[in-house]
């Protein structure tokens, strides 16, 4: 059975180093969320400035995804793969040491652009390195790293919740250290046929990747995965960026209780994400989506009916953590790599990331004000988005994945040695 065939350790190493893009992406977004109330008090921010910070980090990730994915397909995925992580480290250092809100925004700009550039590039690298029978598990493993990025940021936020700006600096400081270590390890990662691949990429006509995107083989899966990701992500991104903020400002929880609630439910998500990895190359991946999507919608319905009351939010977090690993971003990553043409994966997924994150950025700007006006309106809007995502996911499963089954056997242009 393909889903149980052992995967060589070098491939897991490549997946882990590529997954650091997801770790840092999630860590950056959640650390801003965890620290947002602290930044607000320290820098005397209003609700619009708080929204602007969240919008900027999301918007920069969007722009970085678009530019980074394109550059990777033009000049070599490995080259971009190595240097965008270093740029992220520089941005995280600026955020950590920022003495005022202007410097903070500068650091967010740098780190956000770099994080965005690394997302499609790293997924393309691990997908290229993976044989078809292991691609689902290896790509899905990057979602484990995404969950760990959330877990570490929330854990540190809980432990350091009473330390003010000192704790905020430590939370973002660990991202800088993690990025520097990853940069050093990626620089030594050996990918066979690397020279041939870089030469072929550099020799390709500059407009060839863009021309290939306009074909039906690329447009249909790109559009479908985008619709799924943008509708699902509006809910996930709102709670990723504003989960702690909403618990404090809407549910009347303290900073310590809010971060504690987030932290308590994170282990469930991490364990179930590991479970998703185990089934990512089997039919159970798509079978479980149907059940999880329904549970996920139910979670948001309960949060909406209670208008963000603390008890309702507790029930929401339980159901959301149970369902999200099987009906969320991990599915988007795997479906994208399975259905998008191999020669344009960086550009096409970078485009879907960019467009979706652009929408998230606009939504993030208005979220604090909308939550202040009516938590119920905010939550019902998210519920509608989650319902749309479920329908998009069903279309991908029933139409696009079966079509891509044969094409999934394409040979990778990058290979990690199996011994």
Image (cartoon, grey):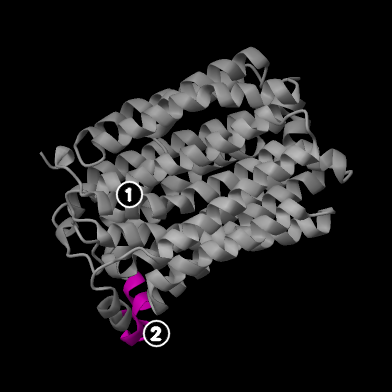
Q: Which quadrant of the structure image shows residue 33?
A: top right
Q: Is residue 210 magenta?
A: yes
Q: Mark 1: few, some, or many residues within 10 Å (few <14, many ≥20)?
A: many
Q: Can residue 329 be seen in this view?
A: no
Disc 1 and disc 2 in contact, CB within 8 angstroms: no
Q: Where does label 1 land, which residue?
A: 139
Please determine whether, in this image, residue 321 is positioned above or below residue 72.
above
Q: Is residue 14 left or right of residue 319?
A: left
Which residue is at a point 55% across and 64% down the rendered structure image? 86
Which residue is drawn at the image coordinates 68% and 24% (left, top)? Answer: 258
Which tag is nearer the camera, tag 1 or tag 2? 1
Q: Residues within 10 Å of mark 2 (few under 14, many from 20)?
A: few
Residue that extends furthest to the top in the rendered view of this protein? 311
Quadrant in the rendering for residue 5: top left
Q: Please say whether residue 208 is one of the residues in the magenta stretch.
A: yes
Q: Which contiguous range is marked in magenta? A: 201-213
Which quarter of the image is occupied by the N terminus? top left
Position of the C terminus by quadrant? bottom left
Q: In this view, does 147 lie to the left or right of 333?
A: right
Residue 52 locus on image (x, y percent): 75, 51
> What is the C-alpha distance between the residues marked 1 and 2?
28 Å
Q: Depth check: give the residue in front, 80 or 53.
A: 80
Q: Position of residue 313 (x, y in %)?
A: 61, 19
Q: Name the residue under label 2.
A: 206
């Amino acid at each position: 059975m393909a889903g149980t065939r052992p995967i060589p350790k070098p491939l897991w190493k490549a997946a882990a180093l590529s997954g650091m893009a997801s770790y840092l992406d999630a860590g950056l977004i959640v650390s801003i969320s965890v620290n947002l109330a602290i930044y607000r008090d320290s820098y005397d921010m209003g609700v619009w400035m708080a929204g602007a910070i969240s919008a900027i980090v999301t918007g920069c990730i969007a722009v970085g995804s678009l530019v980074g994915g394109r550059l990777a397909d033009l000049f070599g995925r490995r080259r971009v793969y190595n240097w965008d992580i270093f740029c992220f480290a520089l941005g995280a250092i600026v955020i950590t040491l920022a003495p005022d809100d202007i410097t903070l925004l500068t650091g967010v700009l740098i780190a956000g652009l770099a994080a965005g550039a690394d997302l499609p590039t790293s997924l393309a690298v691990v997908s290229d390195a993976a044989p078809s029978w292991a691609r689902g598990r290896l790509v899905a493993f990057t979602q484990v790293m995404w969950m760990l990025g959330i877990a570490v940021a929330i854990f540190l936020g809980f432990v350091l919740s009473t330390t003010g700006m000192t704790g905020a600096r430590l939370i973002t400081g660990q991202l800088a250290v993690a990025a520097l270590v990853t940069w050093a390890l990626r620089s030594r990662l050996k990918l066979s046929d690397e020279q041939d691949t870089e030469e072929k990429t550099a020799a390709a006509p500059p407009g060839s990747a863009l021309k290939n995107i306009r074909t039906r083989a690329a447009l249909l899966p790109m559009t479908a995965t985008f619709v799924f990701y943008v509708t699902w992500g509006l809910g996930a991104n709102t709670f990723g960026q504003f989960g702690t903020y909403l618990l404090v400002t809407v549910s009347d929880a303290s900073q310590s209780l809010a971060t504690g609630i987030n932290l308590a439910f994170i282990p469930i998500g991490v364990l179930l994400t590991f479970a998703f990895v185990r089934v990512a190359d089997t039919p159970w991946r798509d079978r479980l989506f149907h059940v999880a999507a329904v549970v996920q919608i139910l979670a948001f319905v309960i949060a909406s009916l209670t208008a963000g009351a603390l008890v309702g939010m507790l029930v929401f977090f339980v159901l959301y953590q149970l369902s999200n690993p099987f009906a969320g971003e991990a599915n988007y990553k795997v479906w994208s790599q399975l259905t998008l043409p191999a020669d344009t994966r960086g550009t096409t997924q970078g485009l879907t990331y960019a467009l979706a994150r652009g929408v998230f950025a606009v939504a993030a700007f208005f979220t604090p004000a909308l939550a202040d006006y009516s938590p119920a309106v905010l939550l019902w809007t998210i519920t509608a988005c989650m319902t749309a995502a479920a329908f998009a996911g069903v279309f991908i499963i029933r139409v696009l994945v079966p079509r891509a089954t044969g094409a999934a056997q394409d040979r990778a242009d990058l290979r990690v040695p199996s011994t």
